[in-house]
Every structure is written in structure tokens, then in C-alpha cells.
Image (cartoon, grey):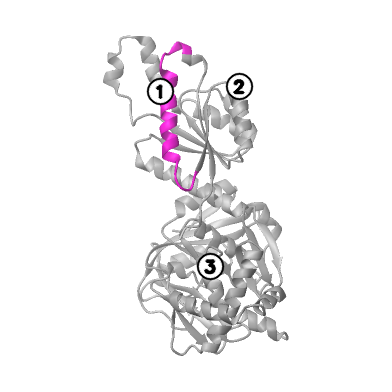
Amino acid sequence: MSPEPHLRVALCGIGLEAYWEQFDGLRAELEGYLARAGEQLQSPGVELVPLGLVDSADRAREAGRQCRATNAELLVLYVTTYALSSTVLLLAKRAGIPILVLNLQPRAAIDYAEFNRLPDRIRMTGYWLAYCSACPVPEIANVFTRAGIPFHQVTGYPDDSATWIEIREWLAAARVRSILRDSNLGLLGHYYTGMLDVATDITQISITFGCLIEMLEVDELSALRETVTGEQIDQRVREFRGHFDIQQDCPLAELERAARSSVALDRFAAQHDLGALAYYYKGSGNAANEDTMSSIILGTSLLTARHVPVAGEYEVKNAIAMKILDSLGAGGSYTEYYAIDFHDDIVLMGHDGPGHIAIAEGKTRVRPLDVYHGKVGRGLSVEMSVRQGPVTLLSIAEDKQHGFKFLVAHATCEPGPTLAIGNTNSRFRFSIGARQFVQQWNEQAPAHHCAIGIGHLGPTLNKLARLLQIPIHQVC
């Protein structure tokens, strides 16, 4: 499910040049730690930029320039022993990117008996210095804070699996930040009249998340539909039958109408290099545009499954939330809660329009609807439940001080009865109960839509929020 990952990470160790002549073998030992950390950081999603051991002002300036020249997006600063904060500040100021400080000592604890048996106090001091990663971190944190340089830290040791889980969460968060900064967010149509919670400041969207906003015209999509050939329509109908469970009462003419729109949508998304899309358009008074927008659901569902998440009702913030979850390999389906089952202590959640069919429980059904509730037109719609098991809800809510904030909840998607109305529909159980979840979620004043992804992703989303420098609130 995960889109092609891309994250360039610069890695350097820090130390003190004066130590090398005093303590024979110390530098080689620390460089060995740094090399092993580089091996751990290497993965299909990471391009590593090795900067070596930075131990002086000159090396700091050189490494900082190299970091900037490579367009790295995260600087991993391995504190191998004591280092001067002045050295680290020179590096950080020149690099100019988010910093992850690794406060990792070689092992869980010093072997005290071995340490005390060493006969040479010089060697004893050198041995101790290899465990001295914790010593300079307060000094570094102090200077970074006074200089206004955001930094993050992981404390642990290399053989601890929890340490590497946390580090990989930081890398995943940094990769999502990179994807957002490289994404074009398409806005097609206009807001649904009266949904004041959905309306947002798109300039602030670009400021916070770094994406480029593309204002798009429905007329262009309608024009592309006219260029779709009969052969392309037949091919897309065959694809529909492979991806969806087409119900027997779906007219072939409606499938062909949806196929025409789907082919046009793919071309439209490619022409604008879209990473996500938010749309809504009545099309009233223009037959071609109404035909386009009333036949878009299957095509937008396919786009969403192919890592171009599509949010209905012009929900700009939720398109970003869906993109974030999809970039984490978790899907990200468009939803809202609409009812509570107090007998089962379950919250029922779903929505009309596109669903993330790649995270569906079973095959997504396609049903014909004689009317789209609250919207113009009629046509085919998708019906699915999110895959059963742990899930994460993500809402991007307005925040007066920071522009936006993350609102997060963990839940479990459970089997059980849902409404067969041609919408996405799922049953979610929350650790704090349905009543408390709804009340606490509402207290954070989100828009009424959110994104659902599979897995519990709160720790990674917390790290992403810190990289974006926005608040996060986790309900449960």
C-alpha cells in the first residue's frame, strides 16, 4: 500500500577533537558506533548522507555545508561522547533542517567490574568517555533552545528494540513531511454551502504543510471526458469488475458513465501531478458538468487506493489528513460519525462518496443510488467497511495560535451490522467508550469529517506534529 518512499537523511556523529591524542583507540571505537547506526538507518525508504564524525569548528562548518548541498531533510545527530555545544551550533545553523539527537550509549549499562579491573587510569577514562553520550545533551538542548532551533531526541542504546522503533517512527514522520512538501493538492469546485467547519485558510495550509494548492476547473475534467474512447471505457469497466463487487442491479450504462469519468480523472490527476484532491460541485444548469460530478465516485475511489486520496465536500483539511495516513501505509478513508449504538457501545462511522478500497474488509460493493442525499444527481456509489482490527482516526482541526492541530484517536474496527445504503460504513470501539469518545472529540472543535487509517499510529503522528510545529491532542 505504501507509496514509493523518499527521504534523504544526513547522519553525523559528534565528539571532541582533543580526546583523540589523549585516548588511543577512542575515535575508532566511536566511528564504529556511527557506522553501525548508519547500517540500522539504511532502508528502502531512506537515502543516507554520511557526514562522518564532527569534532571541531572547521568540521562542523564543512559538514553543515555538505548537509545543505545534498538537500537532506533530516539531520540525525549521533552523540557518541562529549562535544562542545559551540561545535554543534555551527553545524545546525548551516544545515538548517530538523534535527534528531540520538542520545545512545553503547550498551544498557557499564560493566562496572570490568571497568574497575582496568589498570591504566588513562584507558579507564577513555572507556568511560565512550559511554558519555548523555553528558552533552543538556548543553546542546540549552543552546538549541536559546537559538530557536527545533530539535527532537531519542534516548536509549543500540541493542534495544524500543530505541529503534522510536527512531523509525521519527524517520516515518520525516518522510511524510517530505511527501507533503512535494505534493500538489488539487481543489476542484467549491465548498458545500453552509459547512462553515470545513472552510479553511488555504494559505495557512501551504504554510503549515508545504504543499502547493492547485485551483482546478470542473470544465477541464468534463472536456477530458469527451476525449475518452469506447475501448478505454470497456477496459475500465473490466477493471471495475476486478476491483469492486458490482451488484447485479447496477446498470451497464451507469458503469460505462463512471468508467468514462474514471479514465478522465486519471488523466486529470496526472496532468496536474496531484498528490491529493478535495472536490465538490453541484453542476446545476450545466448538463456536462452534472454528468461528470455525479459519476465520479468509482474513479475517486480508485485514485484514493493509488495514493491520490480524494475527499468529498471540498474538505481540504481532510484531504491532507488522508494523505498523511496514506503516506504512512495506513490508507486513510474519508468518514464522519453519524450514529452511536449505545447497546454495543459502538460508534458508527462512514460517508458517501469515495472510500479507500485498499483498506476495505473484503471487496468493496458498488450499488446504484436513485438519489445522492443532499447532492445533485444519481449514479453508482461504493459500500465498504474499514478492515477489522486496530485503526487510527486523524482530524486536522483549526488552531488559533498555530493555524492547525492534529486530533487523534485509537480505536478498533469490529464486525457487526451496518446500514446497506451505498456508503462506507464501519463500527468502531473506543477504549474510553462511545459516549466519552464523542464528547471528548467534540470538545476539540474539529470539522465533522476525519480520516481513518489501519493500525495505531499515535506515536508517529505525534512526531509528525512536532516536525510541523503544530499541537496534537490524542483523545484515546
Residue at the spot 29% in from the left edge and 21% down from the top edge = 112
Answer few, some or many: residues within 10 Å of disc 3's Cα (few below 14, many 20 plus, some between 14 and 19): many
State the extent of the magenta-drawn residues as a range: 21-46
Magenta-span inclusion, residue 39: yes
Marks 3 and 1, how far apart in space?
Answer: 49 Å
Marking on residue 304:
3
Residue 263 spot, x, y in % from top left: 59, 74
Which secondary structure lies at badge 1?
A: helix
Q: State whether residue 353 appears in this view.
A: no
Marking on residue 57:
2
Image quarter where the N terminus lies is: bottom left
Magenta-span inclusion, residue 130: no
Residue that carries the numbered disc 1 in the rendered image: 29
Residue at the spot 57% in from the left edge and 53% down from the top edge = 179
Q: Residue type at mark 1: give it.
A: Glu
- Give the image quarter of residue 145: top right
Residue 470 spot, x, y in % from top left: 59, 50
